Image (spheres, rainbow, N blue to C red):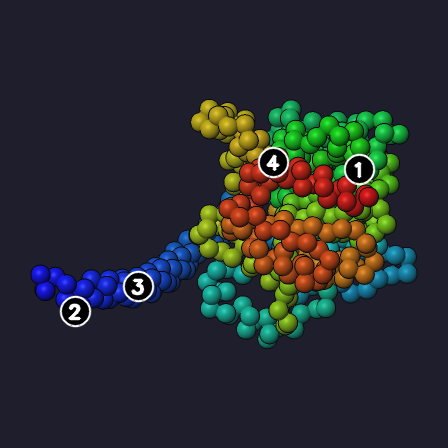
Amino acid sequence: MNFVTSPHFCCQPNSGGVFFRAVCFFSQKRMAVYKDQIVSIITMAGGFLNHILSFFVFTLLDILDFILCYWYKIADFCVEAEWKPCYCSSSAKEAALITSSCSGDILVSEQGEYSNKKKIVRLSCSNKLQLEEISDTLYKRPSFVSEASKSTATATKLIRRPTFTVNPTIVEMLQGKIKGRQQQTSTLPIPRWSECDCETCTAWTCSSSKETLFVKADGAKAEDEVKEDVLFIHGFISSSAFWTETIYPNMSEACKSKYRLLAVDLLGFGRSPKPIDSLYTLTDHLEMIEKSIIDAYKVKSFHIVAHSLGCILALALAVKYPDSVKSLTLLAPPYFPAPRGEQATQYMMRRVAPRRVWPPIAFGASVACWYEHIGRTLCLVICKNHHFWEFLTKLVIRNRMRTYLVEGFFQHTHNSAWHTLHNIICGTAAKMEEYLEELKNRSKCDVTIFHGEDDELIPVECSYNMQSKIPRAKVKVVHNKDHITIVVGRKEAFARELEGIWDNASG
């Protein structure tokens, strides 16, 4: 009995409990440390494996693209009786701008490939701006091996280049474009043999639609009922369906009674024209948007909603029309400020297309950006046979959302995708600082930026980088959403947010 009521005995359970909890606490803490270490080791191992696989995969792709270059020259010559110029041989013959005559013409000297003789070509001054807007990433894309060994950077320091260079491929394209305008022929452009020639893809060649973009309008109809317009600009390899199938159906009737919604297919995409002689520069895209929307619909006051690549065009429009743009809503803007001493266009290309096999979206961007002829092959296999792939997608997935995304992905040509990727995403990298500075100082429009937390293509840091340049911009990071689901994964919520943005900006 005394044993049971002994004070020493009574304190044992309590002491044991404290000791047990302490042991559990330290055990859990040690397990957490071990877990973090294991995760860190796995991450490092995964990164190392990604680098090794990327080295072999992209080295093979370098070789494949080299082979395809000559294969397409032969195929083009057999089918079209001539081969089209490509950007592969720019190092062998590079053109340099040497003078601008009083007549407004630009003289360009082109070094021969097997000779020291120079060929003088003449371009009209109206194309000078286009020459300045053409990205050097079109023809300065070193192989993966040479870049890995840093030999390209060393060689660049040793070679003294002209202050302004023009790739001969660009010269040929501009010459052909000028010649076509001078002849003023009525012959409609014919798609190349590697592009789709179905009725859907060539509908834009009719005289009534070849000069303007395809625009899907909704909302207020009569001009006296339109309070303001809203311009929707899609991203790379997409179409207006990205908005019309997600946002349009979820807009309230009150919103549609006040605002006219205008979703556009950019030049070279969707159901818009895909001219084979275009270099798809910033000027080309902006002029077509102005002609097809601002002029055609007599737009005076408007809001802009843009995704990914479309954000660059949206910024350019906001800077050009500072008094007309009331609000700017950007989703996943590709803004990578270049470190001091690095060329902005090249830095942008390496950030958007890092030549890594993982994640898959980065691998796809890398293939599209670095390999001209592999990209053309993918268009040959996929876009030219898009009816088959659309049927297969509908049969397997049976999901309307994914179906319209796939259809938008198919509706482009290699020429439009290749030049838009380089001349807009990469080529405007140096202009972004100027655009943001102008937007900060001259424009008073509201700026709202949305970004998916899980975006593996354009990281969240891009939005915060932009906010650092425009302090009044509001950044909203959406959890568990990526580059695409930032819109298609939250259609109703995003529609409500847009209505609030427009009403606040208009009020």
The amino acid marked with disc number 1 is: Asp
Answer with mark 4 or mark 1, whichever residue precedes in sequence.
1
Q: Mark 3 = which residue?
A: 25
Instruction: Tell me if residue 107 comes above or below residue 150 in the rendering.
Output: above
- How far separated are the C-alphas under marks 4 and 2? 68 Å
Return the residue nearer the eye: 408 or 427.
408
Badge 1: residue crowd in 10 Å (few <14, some 14–19, many ≥20): many
Quarter residue 142 falls in? bottom right
Between the C-alphas of marks 3 and 2, the distance is 26 Å
Q: Marks 2 and 1: CB-CB under 8 Å?
A: no
Residue 206 appears left or right of 475? right
Q: The residue under label 3 is which amino acid type?
A: Phe
In the picture, measured across the screen, residue 406 lies left or right of residue 136, that is: left
Q: Earlier in the sequence, mark 3 or mark 2?
A: 2
Q: Helix or strand or loop: what does disc 4 sit on? A: helix
Q: Residue furthest right?
A: 102
In this image, 45 relative to 374: left or right? left
Q: Are marks 3 and 4 in contact (CB under 8 Å)?
A: no
Name the N-terminal-most of marks 2 and 1.
2
| Category of crowding for the residue at label 4, using alpha-carbon neighbours closer than 10 angstroms: few (below 14), some (14–19), many (at least 20) | many
* Helix, strand or loop for disc 3: helix
Q: Which residue is mark 1?
A: 229
Quarter of the view holding residue 209: top right
Indicate which disc residue 8 carries.
2
Query: Which dot, 4 or 1, sits closer to the camera?
Result: 4
Where residue 159 appears, x then y in whole percent?
61, 73
Gap between marks 1 and 3 measured at Cα: 61 Å
Residue 65, labelled with which disc?
none
Q: Is residue 460 visible?
A: yes
